[in-house]
Amino acid sequence: MKLGLFRRLYSLIPGRIYLMEPFRRLRILPSAWTKHWFVHGTMRIKTVSGQGFRMMNRGHYIETLLYWNGLEQGWERVSTGVWGALSRKASTVLDVGANTGIYSLIAWSSNPKSQVHAFEPVPGVYDLLELNNRLNGQPLNVHPIACGNIDGEATLYEGLDNHYEASLVQDTHGKGQKQRAYTVPVRTLDGFLLEAGLDRVDLIKIDVEKFEPQVLAGFQNFKVWKPSLLIEILDDSIAAFVEEFVKDLGYLYFNVNEERGLIPTSKLSRSSTYNFLLVQAPQVALLQPWIVHDSSEGSVG
């Protein structure tokens, strides 16, 4: 009750993002406080490359964590760190399930010469993605479509309480959740890339709330180009599909632990922090700062 009252009173303060800036720069407030101190307005996020990027914060949870803690100490700090490192060597990057564009903007800011394609089918979220693209001079190629194993349309189920939970799979996060359903366009990545005239992909992120198998099924050129892959794995059935899909392609697996780092493993499974990273051996050198070498789950050769 006290927290709810605090949030209501805090929301009435005008210009909060400017008032909070000194506190953010000095980093003197505990995270137990700042995670409730939502801000609204344009914010700048620093990257290791120094380029950085701008984003609109409308009081959403992830953007708030990034505002207060930055990339190195904030949300998915290991995933975003290794994504940035791999992006610096990637010419063509795909962000499937881009949401408001955080990973896409990290890829561009890490390598401004790269071609970054961001796919986001949720209309309201796509509007924010497009706005964030404009705030940075439109460096991204943004597409209001879903990716899957067909070219056509499909029903998308959007959580009313959390826009991060939209999926083409109904009841992704359990029965009884409040949803609205509507039709969105779907493209296979093979068809899209052929039309776009792209003949290689170096790096791809797939985060589509249990629709990852369908995205990969529509991307058979993955097996030819063998891009580095950051993928969300929410259950063991998805893990089994991905493992079979990349079988005999020479991939090395890392379970992404957002507190410890990259844990080498010989088998895919549901990850406690959801993400797995799959790379070819030459990319391992780029990942050394994050690799946990004392892991009991196996080793990378």
Image (cartoon, rainbow, N blue to C red):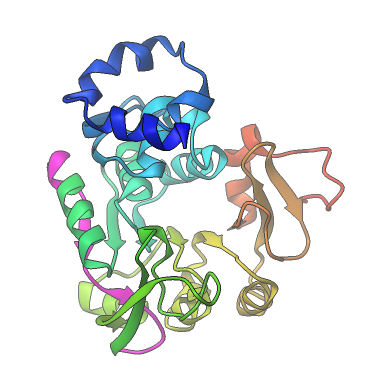
Q: Quadrant of residue 247?
A: bottom right
| Residue 280 relative to residue 123: left or right | right
Residue positioned 40% across, 59% down in the render? 164
Residue found farthest to the right: 296
Relative to 99, 74 lies left or right: right
Q: Tell me where residue 255 appears, x and y as whole percent.
A: 68, 53
Asked if residue 120 is positioned above or below residue 169 in the image, the reply reads above
Q: Quadrant of residue 10?
A: top left
In percent of width and height, residue 143 lies at 22, 66
With 144 as the anchor, is 199 left or right in this view? right
From this viewpoint, is residue 41 visible? yes
- Picture quadrant where residue 192 is located: bottom left
Residue 12 is a magenta residue:
no
Residue drawn at 71 percent across, 66 percent down: 269
Q: What is the tally of numbered marks visible in this picture?
A: 0
Looking at the image, which residue is at 32% across and 87% down? 154
Question: Can you give x and y, in whole percent of width and height, for residue 214 in the image?
Answer: 47, 82
Whether residue 220 is visible, yes or no, is: no
The image shows residue 84 at horizontal and vertical percentages of 44, 40
Compared to residue 74, the image places residue 27 above or below, namely above
Towards the viewer: 165 or 207: 165
Residue in front for this viewpoint, 190 or 12: 12
Looking at the image, which residue is at 16% across and 25% down? 14
Q: Which residues are magenta?
A: 134-152
Magenta region includes residue 149: yes
* 190 in relation to 30, above or below: below
